[in-house]
Image (cartoon, helix red, strand yellow):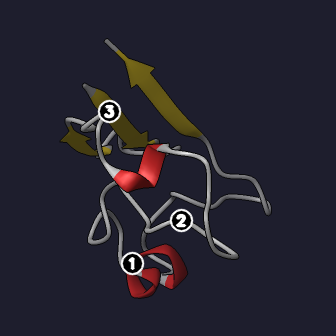
């Protein structure tokens, strides 16, 4: 499983989402066209939330994303 975590640099209100990749999916095979079908967490973090001045996911033009693979 793959876990993505966007780190909140102030309040520790991290956002986390997990998905289980399917190794047989065409997303993980050699591309036969210009690009593969995307895989992951498409609703992980809306851009509006990143732009919110009250959030601290981006601070001083820096953001941290933690990726854990089990």
Disc 2 secondary structure class: loop
Q: CA distance from mark 3 to mark 1?
A: 31 Å
Residue 22 on image: x %, y %: 24, 38
Q: Which mark is residue 1?
A: none
Where residue 31 sits: x, y (%)? 62, 58
Q: Nearer the viewer, residue 35 or 59?
A: 35
Q: In terms of sequence position, does the residue under pointer 1 or pointer 2 come before the other?
A: 2
Question: Residue 6's x, y, as percent?
Answer: 44, 47
What residue is shown with label 2?
36
Q: Is residue 58 left or right of residue 14?
A: right
Q: Is residue 64 left or right of residue 62?
A: left
**Viewer-proximal residue, 63 or 70?**
70
On the image, which quarter does residue 33 sit in?
bottom right
- The reply to whether the C-beta atoms of the residues labelled 3 and 2 are less than 8 Å apart is no
Between circles 1 and 2, the one closer to the viewer is: 2
From the viewer's side, name the closer residue of 23 and 65: 23
- Please count the marks in the image: 3
**Pointer 3 local density, CA inside 10 Å: few below 14, some 14–19, many at least 20:** few
- Residue marked by disc 3: 23
Task: Tell me what residue is drawn at x 67 percent, y 58 percent.
Answer: 59
Q: Few, some or many C-alpha atoms within 10 Å of disc 2 (few <14, some 14-19, many ≥20)?
A: some
N-terminal-most mark, 3 or 1: 3
- Nearer to us of marks 3 and 1 is 3
The residue furthest bottom is 48
Residue extending farthest right: 61
**Image position of 43 (left or right of 64):** left
Q: How many angstroms separate mark 1 from mark 2 (CA)?
A: 27 Å
Residue placed under numbered mark 1 in the picture = 49
């Amino acid at each position: 499983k793959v876990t993505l975590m966007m780190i909140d640099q102030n309040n520790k209100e991290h956002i986390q989402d997990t998905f289980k990749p399917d190794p047989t999916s065409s997303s993980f095979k050699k591309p036969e066209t210009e690009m593969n079908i995307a895989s992951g967490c498409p609703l992980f973090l809306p851009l509006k939330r990143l732009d919110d001045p009250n959030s601290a996911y981006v601070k001083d033009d820096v953001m941290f994303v933690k990726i854990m693979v089990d």
